[in-house]
Amino acid sequence: MSFSRIRNEATLVLADGTVFSGEAIGATDVDPNKISTGELVFNTSLTGYQEIITDPSYAGQVVAFTYPHIGSYGISDVDNESVRPFCRGVIVRDLVEVPSNWRSTEDLEGFLTRHGVGGVMGIDTRRLTRHIREAGAMTCAFGGAPVADLLRAARAEPGTAGMNLVDEVSTVDPYFVGTGSRVIVAYDYGIKSTILRHLSTLGTVEVVPADTPAAEVLGRNPDGVFLSNGPGDPEALPHLVNEIVNLLDAVPVFGICLGHQLLATALGAKTYKLPFGHHGANHPVQRLSTGVVEVTAQNHGYAVSEETLRDATVTHRNLNDGVVEGINSTTIPAFSVQYHPEAGPGPHDALYLFDEFAHLMDTKSLKMRRL
């Protein structure tokens, strides 16, 4: 661990009373009296901390990194997945204070401080991760306040269950990316920049606010509609599901992550909260039609209940715990995956899904080539 300067002490307290002591980083070191709260999750990616921190799907959550050294290659503006971090904080074993990377324009702590995000370093993240795996994801609080105050704050934090966090991350005004003959409307539930880069290779993409009525979307005469990733509990978003219902059978639909959960809900399925979610870049997923196993990037705390699926088949399955990772409607041109084929960070095994979306838009067929 680097001790290049004296830091304020900070404590991480979980809602079950578990206490971890460390040192303040970022906004927490600037203001030791500040108490930050959120739902604590762990991410197993070895690299890509910047993309993870700026992924809007982490809104409402505190991210603990299992890899011990975070910050070694600094920050590069082109690697941001959104305009700012939406996570509530970061927990690390060792924060690298002097990055080494010719692309770096800023160190990680400076980035966190500039955006008002705090955290704690010096935490035994292996012990912390084992605890979350056994006890489940839970709310937490961290800062320089007394443990009793932090515990009260952790227990008062609502977490993500039942929470609409999409309103916090969605765009206010529509905007365009890419050029091309296909017209794609992308619902922004917390869309990542890497997703937009891939979609923009397929055509002209108009990104619209999460609550845009289906009638307005269909009035744009799109060749396809994309449902993006995003944070929070899909059961808290019935108003968004209603608009998706009005899109179905009128235009091809492709969903990722939260978009997958909302599409499944629109098709009549239910969702449920996972014990500690899937957050990392090395999750094995099997494509059932071929038996091929893809190494995938994932970031979600909720999943689709297979028993409640109607008029849809399961196309992909998580080999760690059997969770539904992809569905294909049997009645309309619509499909989705729970994981992140765009990566950012992570492997590119599933990039073919963007080609499948293009094929679906061009043919408007129920059958996709390799799903």
Image (cartoon, rainbow, N blue to C red):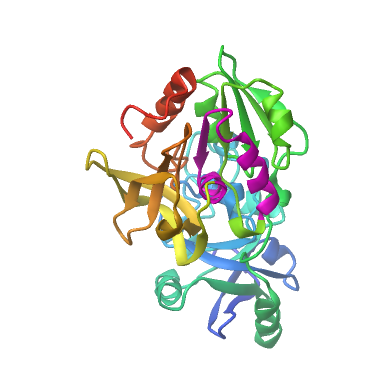
Left or right of 163: which side holds 357? Answer: left
Q: Position of residue 355 (x, y in %)?
A: 41, 25
Residue 271 visible: yes
User: Viewer-proximal residue, 282 or 250?
Assistant: 250
* Image spot of residue 330 (x, y percent): 41, 38
Query: Which residue is pictured at 33% across the width and 51% down the height?
Result: 317
Q: State the image coordinates of residue 10 (x, y, percent, origin top left).
A: 62, 75
Q: Quadrant of the C terminus?
A: top left
The secondary structure making up most of the magenta span is helix
Q: Which stretch appears magenta?
A: 237-266
Is 250 located above or below residue 23 in the figure?
above
Furthest toward the left, the residue is 291
Q: Residue 126: which quarter of the image?
A: bottom left
Whole-percent x and y of residue 367? 37, 29
Image position of 282 (left or right of 345): left
Which residue is at the front of the view, 16 or 3?
16
Q: Quarter-wise, where is residue 35 in the image?
A: bottom right
Identify the residue shown where x is 42% and y is 22%. Answer: 359
Give the left or right position of residue 125, taking residue 190 as reference.
left
Q: Is residue 288 above or below residue 144?
A: above
Q: Total label count?
A: 0
In the rendered image, the vertical position of residue 81 relative to residue 147, given as above or below: above
Is residue 67 something that shows in the picture?
A: no
The answer to if 247 sits in the magenta stretch is: yes
Q: Nearer the viewer, residue 19 or 15?
A: 15
Q: Indicate whether residue 206 is drawn in magenta.
A: no
Residue drawn at x 73%, y 37% is 212
Q: Residue at x 66, y 80 (%)?
A: 155
